[in-house]
Image (spheres, grey):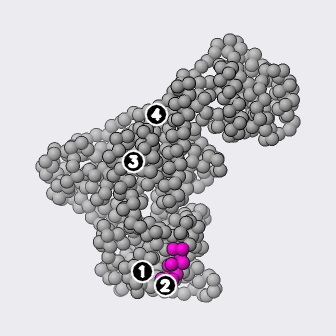
Amino acid sequence: MANTLTILCDAPCIEPPFNMKHLHQFLNGNAYLVPYICSQEGIRRIEKLASDSKPDQILIVTGQCPAAKTLLATLPSLANYPVEILDISPFQSETVAAAHILFKLKQSKKRAPRRLKKIYDDAVLVIGGGVAGVQAALDLAEAEKTVYLVERAVSIGGIMSQLDKTFPTLDCSICILGPKLADVGRNPKIELLTLTEVKSVKGTAGHFDVTLTLHPRYVDMNRCTGCGACAEVCPVILPNEWDLNLKPRKCIHILFAQSIPLRSTIDMNHCIKCQLCVQACEKDAINLEDEEREKKIKVGAIVMAPGLDPFDASKRPSLGYGRFENVFTNIDFERIVCASGPTGGQLIRPDGKPIKRVAFIQCVGSRDIRFNRYCSGYCCMASIKEAMLIKESVPEAKISIFFNDIRAAGKGFEELYLRAQERGITFVKGLPSKIEEDPETKNLILWFEEMVEGKPKSAEEFDFIILATAVEPDSQIDQLARILGIKRDSLGFASERHPTWGAIETSVPGIFMAGGVQGPKDIPETVAQASGAAARALALLHRLSISKNA
């Protein structure tokens, strides 16, 4: 005979004609009245009732409360009990609702008790090796948790590894990130899995069975030392996608100098199998017959941090990206201005001419009903930062930033904006309509209308134009959302469990999120949320461990 613990939620969200106190009287001692089951006091009361009565199952009676099921599913203290949520709002009266509840209780007594097996895996899967995934993994490892850090690229680091400086302090980006990447590589609690994607996820909070697909690197990670001898003899030269195709690389290559893991990879799509790399490798690390394989892991929680993708500026053909050689995106420019970039940090055009007149165009792909309605958040400060970097290298440069609105809401952001104005950087309110190219000089003619003073449309000539592009949900978010079973919002980003008190949690208990997967963020906000996601995962595993040992 099954013993059912019945809880009535007494909260103002229970709409008329229902009064839970009256319903409690109708049930004649067959239920417990608990005010606000979603409050801390309500949760403690339910946990105590379950501990004292040791039921075979729990029935929660409430109204249309979307939080009830998710909230109760994440309580480790109830992990051993089948929990059913009963929404009484469809019933016509308290009498009908009471009769339905009593019938369910009578039926349950005829069934044999059904107890759930305690399940708990003390490891965490972190999806994405950008700054969010790296920070989350390090925080979890510091708490002595086993971490599987999965990244589909050949190295961790993400977009931050491609930046020259960060705002608002103008600190070296890789100087900040590089030590973090190295910490990941040498931490014994972190198993780093690059060139890896999540194939399937099954289970619930506390016990997820995960299948990973490991794509071939064609280089033995245990034998390769990253010496680069193989790249020296490789005859195949390709555009380096990490440098936005502005710099060459070999078919066998290390992505960038601070790559973690610092191991070579063969681009098999372009490999001619000349065997020269095999002959050059003294460690016998090259394996041209390497194959895709699978790896199965068990984790108690998941942190998803796949990051963001930049908007394809060629979708705005009037701005000339991809057609005019001196029109670049802000990410392109980060590689150009960087000392390790294609020009060694020299601010020159592809034709070798120095950059003297520069225009920045904001909101390319953002706040645009044709593409993305939202503000991408980072772009205003990124352009101001890049303009300041130009001023540092070329103090006499004429720089104009064409903007919709300047949004400088973060700590130190307004101060950087004011410093830029003091340095003589011009801010023009008005988004240009088109860019033309002088076929002889390759200079760019920018057509715009100044909105504040209402001046008619005019043209101005520049040497170099930088487009501040939007950021969009990661290209793999569709597939990842289906695998994890999470919900997405109308913009394509992952939906939070609750915008206020569940902003780090996804719609699936035990799966947390950090960084751009939730929406556009700058680096400080991303790092803070990553630490928050790690803390929430640790709290879940801690509660599960208490439940397991109880």
Q: Amino acid at mark 4?
A: Asp
Residue 283: x percent and y percent? 16, 45
Looking at the rendered structure, the number of numbered marks drawn on it comes to: 4
Give the crowd class for mark 3: few <14, some 14-19, many >=20 residues within 10 Å: many
Is 386 in front, or is 328? Answer: 386
Quadrant containing the N terminus is top right
Marking on residue 424: 2
Q: Which residue is mark 1?
A: 391
Marking on residue 122: 4
Asked whether disc 1 touches disc 2, contact meaning CB atoms under 8 Å apart, the reply is yes
Q: Amino acid at mark 3?
A: Glu
Magenta-colored span = 415-425
Q: Which residue is pictured at 48% across the width and 76% down the height?
A: 360
Check disc 1 and report its element: helix, strand or loop. helix
Instruction: Decide if residue 338 is on the left or right side of residue 313.
Output: left
Q: Earlier in the sequence, mark 1 or mark 2?
A: 1
Q: Main secondary structure of the magenta part?
A: helix
Q: Earlier in the sequence, mark 3 or mark 2?
A: 3
Name the front one of labels 1 and 3: 1
Name the front one of labels 4 and 3: 4
Give the crowd class for mark 1: few <14, some 14-19, many >=20 residues within 10 Å: some
Q: Which residue is mark 3?
A: 151
Residue 106: x percent and y percent? 75, 16
Q: Amino acid at mark 2?
A: Gly
Give the crowd class for mark 4: few <14, some 14-19, many >=20 residues within 10 Å: some
Q: Which residue is pictured at 51% across the width and 86% down the height?
A: 459
Q: Earlier in the sequence, mark 4 or mark 1?
A: 4
